[in-house]
Amino acid sequence: MTKEKNNEKKVHFHLSMSGKWTLLTSLFVLISVIVFSTITYKKSIDTLIEVERKNINETLKDVSSRLKISNNELSIRNTAYYLSNDNNTLGSDPTERTLEANLIRLNSFISELSQPELSVSVYNSEQSLVFETRNTRHAYFGSDKQEVSQKIVDGKTGFLATEPIYSKQKGQKIGYVQLFYDLSQIDSVKENLITLMLWLSLFSIIISLLFGFILSNYFMRPLKKITDVINEIKADPQTEARMPVEEMKDEFADLGIIFNDMMDRMQRFIEQQQQFVGDVSHELRTPVAVIEGHLKLLDRWGKDDPEILEESLSASLQEISRMKSLVQEMLDLSRAGQIDLHHKNDVSNAKEVIHQVYNNFVMLYPDFKFVLDDDIIQEKQVRIYRNHLEQILIIILDNAVKYSLNRKEILLSISTSHEYLQIAIQDYGEGISEADLEQVFNRFYRVDKARSRHKGGNGLGLSIAKQLVETYEGDIVVESILEKGSVFRISLPLAKEE
Ligand code: ADP
C-alpha cells in the first residue's frame, strides 16, 4: 500500500520541460563563468607576478651597476653617492663631500626605490648592513651568486634578489646588495578578483535563471497549446478544436499543420466508419425482413400449400444469395484499402489482362456487341496486381451490361499517354444524371434503388473500383448523358521501363 503510494508520488514528481531547460542553461552558464573566471584569474596573477619579477631584476641590475663604480668597500657614504648619481659621471670623490650633500642627490633615484613594497639593503664585504631604504634590518640572505627567487621573509611572500658587488675597476668584492619585493599587495588583488568573480557568477546565474525561465516559457507555449488541444480531443473526439497555426510561425506551425491534417482525416475516417456501419445494417435489414416475412407466412399457413412453400423458399434463397454477395463485396471493399501491405510492387501485362477480360465478356454475353479498340502496339506493364485490374474491369463492364437498354453495344478502348495506361469503357445505356454523377462512387449509392436491387446491385461495385484505382495511384472518372450512355475512364500508372 505504502509502496504504491510512493510510486504514485514518484510518477507525479517531475520537472517540467521549461524547468529543466532553465536549470540546464543556468548550470551551463555557471560552469562557463567559473571556467572563464578561473582562467582569467590565473592568467592575470601570473602576468602580474611576471611583471614584478622583471621589475625586480631590472632594479637589481640598476642598483648593482651603480654600486660597481666604487673602488672601495661599500659604506653609507659611497653607497648614497653612487645610488644618487644619475649619469654615471662622477664628480668629486664622494668621501670628500658631506653626507648631507650626497643624501640630497640620492633622493632622485631613491624615490624610485621608495615604493612601499620594495626594500633595498646594501652590505659591505663582511655582510654587515651599511644602507637600507626601509627599516627592516634584514641580514644578507643570499649567496655569492646573483639570485632572484620567491621567498617568505618576516612572514611576507615576495621576491628576494641578491647579488655580491665587485668593483668594476679593481675586480675585488666590495659588498652585497639585497632587494626584497613584497608580493602581499598581489594578495589583495587576488582577493578583489575572487570577490568580483563571485559576484559575476551570482549575477550570471540570476540573469540566466531569469532569461532561461522567460525564454523556455516562450518556446514551450505552443507545446502547452498542443496539450490543451489534445485534451479537448480526448474529451470529445469529434471536437472542432485545432492547433492555432497562424499564431506560430516556426517548426511548431509545421507540427500544427500535420496535427490538424491528421485530426481532420481521423475524424473523417470515424465518420465514414459510422456511416458504413449504418449503411451496412440498413442494407442487411431489407433481406432479413424479407426472409422473416416469408418464414412467418410459411409458419402460419404456407406449410401445407406447396405453391406458397415453393414461392417463399425461392424468394428467401434469392435474398440469402444477395446477402452473400453483399458480404463478399463489403469484404472486397475493406481489402481494397489494404493493398499497400500485400501487392504494392506488383505489375501486370496490360494488353494480356484486358484482352482476356474482353474475351470472357464476349463469351458470357453473346447478345451484346463488344468492340475492343487497342492502341497499344507493344505489351506494357501496368503497376497493379493482375487480379485487381481484372476486378476493376469486371465491375465497370458488368455495370455497362446491367445498365444498357436497347442498344446492346459496349466499346472498350485502351491506350497509353504520359506514363499512364488509359482505359475507357463506353455504353449506350440509361446514363446517369448530373446530380447522381458525383455520388455513384459512394458506398451503397444507387441511382434507382429498386431497379438496381432487381439487377442484383448493392451499390458497392464502383466504390470498390475507385478504392482500388486510387490505392494504385490511378484515377477513375465518369461522363454520362441521361438515356444516351456513359463512359468510364480509368488511368493507371505504367511501370518504369528498364
Ligand atoms: P451497383 O451494384 O448498384 O451497380 P455500383 O457502385 O456499381 O453499384 O454503381 C452505383 C450506381 O451507379 C448504380 O446503382 C447505377 O445506378 C449507377 N451506374 C453505374 N454504372 C452505370 C452505367 N454504366 N450506366 C448507368 N448507371 C450506372
Image: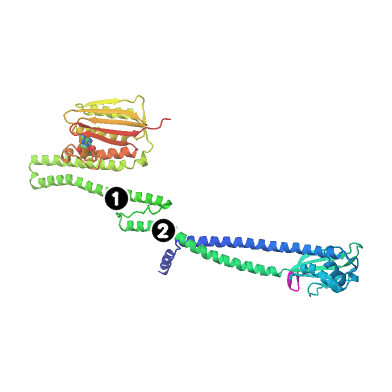
Magenta region: which residues?
152-157
Q: Which residue is mark 2?
A: 221
Amino acid bearing label 1: Ile
Q: Is residue 184 above or below residue 487?
A: below
Residue 330 in the figure: left or right of residue 214 = left
Q: In x, y percent, where is residue 439?
A: 23, 41
Say which label, 1 or 2, has the lower sequence index. 2
Label placed on residue 270: 1
The residue nearer to you, when weighing 188 against 487, is 188
User: Dot 2 lies on which element?
Assistant: helix
Mark 2: give few (<14), some (14-19) or many (20+) Cα within 10 Å: some
Q: Is mark 1 within 8 Å of ligand 1?
A: no
Name the quadrant where ligand 1 sits. Answer: top left
Residue 97 in the figure: left or right of residue 206 = right
Mark 1: give few (<14), some (14-19) or many (20+) Cα within 10 Å: some
Q: What residue occupies the far top of the structure in this picture?
A: 377
Q: Quadrant of residue 40?
A: bottom right
Question: Is-magenta flag for residue 326?
Answer: no
Residue drawn at x 84%, y 66% is 85
Q: CA distance from mark 1 to mark 2?
A: 30 Å
Quadrant where the C terminus is found in the figure: top left
